[in-house]
Amino acid sequence: MKKMISRRNFLTAAGVVAAAGVLTACGGSSSSTAASSTAASAAGSAAASGDTIKIGVMGPLTGNVSVYGQAVVNGASLYLKQVNADGGINGKQIEILTEDEQGDATQAVNCFTKMVDEGITALVGDVTTTPTLAVAAESADYNMPMVTASATAEAVTYDAETDTVNENVFRATFTDPFQGIKMADYAYQKLGYTKAAVIFKKGADYNEGLAENFVNEFESLGGTIVDQESYSEGDVDFKTQLTSIMGKGPETVFCPNYYEEVGQILSQAESVGLNVPFLGGDGWDGLEGYATADQLKDSYFCANYAKGSSPEFEDAYKAEYGEDYPNGFAPLGYDAAKTVVYGVQAAEDAGLEAGTDEYKQAVNDAIASGTIEGITGTFTFDEHHDPVKKTAILTYVDGKPELKEMF
């Protein structure tokens, strides 16, 4: 297994330096310089004393996809705080360095290199696919262990064109191909649909990845894809595509998009008279606030976690943050952090010095060969560093998602 080496971008970041568990943003103003220097000095002294282990946690805490980032960062931070409360890792406390990359790939690389400069030993992140791809490429130069909770594009961990695994990158969620294939199997084998249409955003790895694999699998099973429609970033009117789909007479529509756009699509489908059930991937998580119960009737989507699967986690989340966990990205963040700690524990047990090449390799090796007892299921990692796990199929009851079955 060879490592993918990326070109180093040498991007730098200014801003407030993170203390344990404190949110910072990459690219701050010059007025924060004094505070940054003071905090950096204190953090450096703590790291030098050997009393702490720095773990980075990053995601979009502001911006269009912040509902995912906040959930992942909260879930990950919750687990790391629990480890600290239980005595840490071999007596060392975890110092959590949290960054907001605002859903932007360039900012994500800025945040990553900033945390590297601050001495992280491993990273929980990133969250959505495009920023995660950028961070994964940058992280290869450092062989920095990183576990994304939720980025699903195959290329995050594995380059199919060169048959190369990103040795330092792992994920807690399933992949785009996995989701597309699973939903095609479920549509054809469990729901009995033989005619399907697809509507997806073009130019986006997540959306295109699910759509392509759904189409290929559904047709391989003997089904017919009666129409494939796409739209562009920023589009808000989908009636032309939906009218075309309605004219082709599908039994179901696969809509592998994120929840806000799905809500608009379902509303406009209802308005043009397209009343067949829709299917989706994990980007539907959080959709219930954007669609009515009628629009969601008989719809299904796949997810990593179903509410009620881990009452202990759900109770702890509410106690920590004063609210119910928002979506399935929070438990994925929890499991991503658990995976990182699993690897760091192995490096610490071996008596290695944090930050050294040997330490980072020990973390990566432990994760690659480990078994994680997560709240989204018990999982190992395959040769591409993707988790081997079942998926939850959720449907809607009175407009709210409920577990239908594990599939």
Image (cartoon, rainbow, N blue to C red):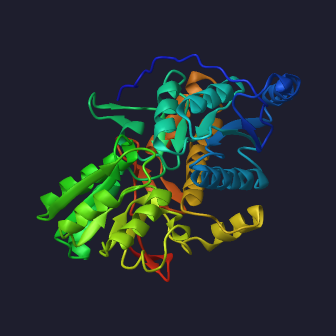
Q: Residue at x 65, y 49 (%)?
A: 73
Please give left or right for residue 188 compared with residue 341 in the image.
Answer: left
Figure quadrant of the N terminus? top left
Please give left or right for residue 293 compared with residue 206 in the image.
Answer: right
Is residue 187 at least partly visible in the picture?
A: yes
Name the residue furthest bottom. 398
Q: Residue at x 48, y 60 (%)?
A: 259
Seen from the viewer's position, the closer of residues 245 and 70 is 245
Q: Position of residue 318 (x, y in %)?
A: 72, 67
Seen from the viewer's position, the closer of residues 170 and 204 is 204
Q: Position of residue 326 (x, y in %)?
A: 62, 64
Q: On the image, which quarter does residue 180 sit in?
A: bottom left
Q: Is residue 185 above or below residue 169?
A: below
Q: Residue at x 20, y 58 (%)?
A: 227
Q: Is residue 255 above or below residue 57?
A: below
Please give left or right for residue 62 compared with residue 202 in the image.
Answer: right
Figure quadrant of the C terminus? bottom left
Q: Is residue 326 above or below residue 202?
A: below
Q: Position of residue 313 (x, y in %)?
A: 64, 66
Is residue 177 at least partly visible in the picture?
A: no
Q: Position of residue 355 (x, y in %)?
A: 65, 25
Seen from the viewer's position, the closer of residues 305 and 29 is 29
Q: How many marks?
A: 0
Q: Residue at x 83, y 31 (%)?
A: 46
